[in-house]
Every structure is written in structure tokens, then in C-alpha cells.
Amino acid sequence: ADKISTQINAQVQNHSLIKFNKEKFLSIALNPNGKINHPLINDIPTGKSLEGFLFPDTYLFPEDINTEDMIIKFLDNFNSKLETAKGNFKRIEDLSLSDYEIITLASIVEKEGDGEIKNNSLIADVFYKRLRGLNGPKKLESDVIILYQLKDWKATIYQTDLDNESYEYNSHVHEGLPPTPICNMGLNSLIAAFHPTPNDYLFFLADENGKIYYAKNYDEHLTNISKYLN
């Protein structure tokens, strides 16, 4: 939310959009309940932010738009993309996930995937299998979730981070989904989370060029690590 508000603030200063207020934008984005009227707010648990709901896109605003109406434009756009992504999706009943939880998963897919619907949908299914416990404990074991905790997408993750139980966003030690989405995702990640592609994989990794490799078991995963990450 802070990154988006900074980008908007830079743009509006160039056009003298005096009704935009960065501090007010952040105040609403960080705690929207009771501050803004939009149907999507009902999907966001009390006390949670608009992380994941501010769809990244090009927006055209009138010069006299106020902060609340600007955020509503963001939410209207996200709601449209959400309905597109859901389509005729049949909810995975055995997980009983809410829309908010699937959006949270979509945000993880956004950071783990390559943006292509094919790979994002395969990765989403891997995570659904992990949530079911098909890989043992119901842990996502996703490093990008820790990076969100560290507030640095380029941070080096150490073993002490992987073992840190005090990290609320540490899927290596905590089962299930993180408390909130970890980013504002694109449409392909939303579609992938609502329409995962069934597969036999339990692991995946990306090489230094972003190419993704999959494995059906841990031994295959170790082989991929040796071939593509060393």
C-alpha cells in the first residue's frame, strides 16, 4: 500500500491534484473498516489492510477526486478482476477457503510464479496440495512470505529466519496461509488461485533466469536444486 501511495503521490503532485492526501490514503489502506463504503470491505477481516485489493493498473482520475473515491476506483477495478478470475470456479470444498484466503494464496502465487498462467496455475495446485497436508505438515514453505515479513523482496534469508517462530509470516514453521495477502497481484495469479491446474508435483523452484522446474518428490527436488541452483 505504501509503494502504491508513493507512486500516486508523485503523479498527482505533477498535476496539482490537491484533494489527494497520502497520509489519508495510507490510513484507509491500512485499516479500511468503517472508513470507506464498498462491498469488498465485507470480505476483509476486521483489522486487516487493503493489501491484495489495490489492483495494479493504469488509472485515470479526475483532477478533483478525493482520497476515498480514488480508493473506491481501485476496489471497483479489483472487484471486476475478481469476478473474472472466479468465473465458473467450483470452490475446493475440503479446504473451505473464503475469497479472502484464496486472494491471499493468489498473492503468494504472484511472487512465486513467473506471471504466466500456465506456471502460476501449476504452482497454485502445489500450494493447495500442501494446504491439504499431502506433503506432510500443512506448511506452504514459501520464502516469499518471509520476505514480506522482512519488508524487503531482495533480502537474504538465513536459517535463523526459516526457524523463527516469532515471525507471523513464516510458512516454514506455521501451518496454513499467512494472516493477509503479501502483495497486490495481477489477473493471472488470481485466475490461477481460483482455477489451479491439477498436477502430480509437490515441489518447484526457479533458476536465476526465472525458469521454473517441478518435482514430484523430494529426491527430484534435490536433483533440481543441484542442477539449477548450484
Image (cartoon, rainbow, N blue to C red):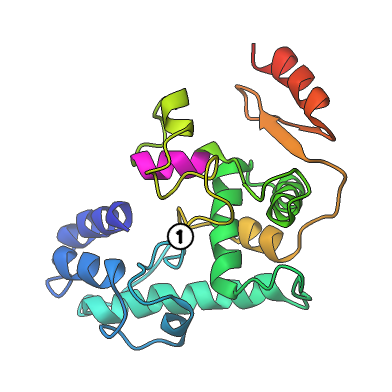
Q: Foreground: 137 or 215?
A: 137
Q: Residue at the spot x=87%, y=44% of the render? A: 200
Q: Position of residue 183 (x, y in %)?
A: 45, 54
In the image, the segment drawn in magenta is: 144-150
Q: Mark 1 points at which residue?
A: 179
Disc 1 residue crowd, few under 14, some 14–19, many 20+, Cα 10 Å: few
* Position above or below: 154 against 1: above
Residue 31 located within the stretch drawn in magenta:
no
Q: Position of residue 18 (x, y in %)?
A: 12, 71
Q: In this view, does 43 lie to the left or right of 34?
A: right
Q: What residue type is labelled 1?
A: Pro
At 63% from the left and 30% from the top, the residue drawn is 210
In the depicted view, which residue is nearer to us: 138 or 227? 138
In the figure, residue 65 lies in which quadrant? Answer: bottom left
Is residue 186 visible in the rendered image? The answer is no
Residue 114 spot, x, y in % from top left: 64, 41
Side of 102 where 134 appears, left or right = right
In reply to whether residue 148 is colored magenta, the answer given is yes
Taking the image as shown, residue 170 lies to the left or right of residue 195, namely: left
Residue 142 picture quarter: top right
